Image (tube, grey):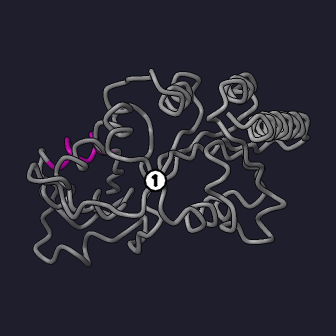
Amino acid sequence: MDVDLLIDEITKNVVSRLKDEMCIRAFDESKSENRILVLLPENVLSIGKFLNYVKGKYEDGELLVAGNVETLDGVLKPELSNSITCVNIQDKHIRHKVGSIFDSYKEVCCIAPGIKLLENIAKGDDSQFIEYLLLQGILHKKPTTIYVDYMPNGISSDGLMGKVSTLFREIEASGIKVENIDRQTDAVISAEKVYQDGLITEQDIDEMWANGVTEVDCSRCIVTPLAKDRAKELSITLKY
């Protein structure tokens, strides 16, 4: 074993931990009342796109990004580097620090979770750190969101996207919002303009949900009983 290399590695780890501890301490001592915990799973694609979106959504917020800090190198824009605190939760000690100030977070979110992580959240499995913090967000009644850059087209039981649709519905039923950062559909749409026959069915509600719609003007439409039940299940507001 090369002793010098071992010493260098130990020194690097110690310095990294001390740096992260200082970042968390500064974050905790800040006077911001809008502190957001952003959980970053491993192997996330387009990290910059997600962080730009989240920071834009919380312009006056202070973000603590907890994940593999090394994956953020060269990703953040210069203007973001000064407004986002990043720490490495691969270190057990840092995970404890991030969790110890949980009460100070106004909101909790996770960007681009993989299928396995989605499955764990849907079934309430908090054995892993990210899942644990997301579920703690719900238990402590904090706004909790999962950000993705895709959304199944309609509700289907077939194939991978059908599985994802089911997971999204189960996750939203638990109180965690799923938001598509690439969605082009307005949050409020007029059912009159879209459904010329004046009838909204359960399938229509499924398609709205898949497109990120949260509110529908039904003042001149007939909504079937099953559609009403589905809208309630998917947290879509029907306005008459």
Picture quadrant of residue 18 = top right
- Would residue 187 appear left or right of 193 to someone viewing this image? right
Instruction: Assess whether residue 233 is covered by the magenta stretch.
Output: yes
Q: Position of residue 46 (x, y in %)?
A: 51, 66
- Would residue 78 appear left or right of 236 to someone viewing this image? right
Q: Secondary structure at mark 1?
A: loop
Q: Which residue is mark 1?
A: 112
Q: Which residue is at 38% across, 23% downward?
A: 125
Q: Indicate the amino acid at tag 1.
A: Ala
Q: Quadrant of the C terminus?
A: bottom left
Q: Which residue is at 63% across, 66% downward?
A: 52
Picture quadrant of residue 150 = bottom left
Q: Position of residue 74 (x, y in %)?
A: 69, 68
- Would residue 192 appear left or right of 224 to someone viewing this image? right
Q: Position of residue 143 (x, y in %)?
A: 57, 39
Q: 7 or 236: nearer the eye?
A: 7
Q: Which residue is at 74% across, 61% downward?
A: 59
Q: Position of residue 41 (x, y in %)?
A: 51, 45
Q: Which residue is at 31% across, 26% downward?
A: 123
- Would residue 149 appear left or right of 85 to someone viewing this image? left
Instruction: Assess whether residue 87 is covered by the magenta stretch.
Output: no
The magenta-colored residue range is 227-234
Q: Is residue 152 above or below residue 15?
A: below
Q: Is residue 20 visible?
A: no
Dot 1 alpha-carbon crowd within 10 angstroms: few under 14, some 14 to 19, many 20 or more: many
Q: Main secondary structure of the magenta part?
A: helix
Q: Quadrant of the N terminus?
A: top right
Q: Is residue 226 above or below residue 179?
A: above
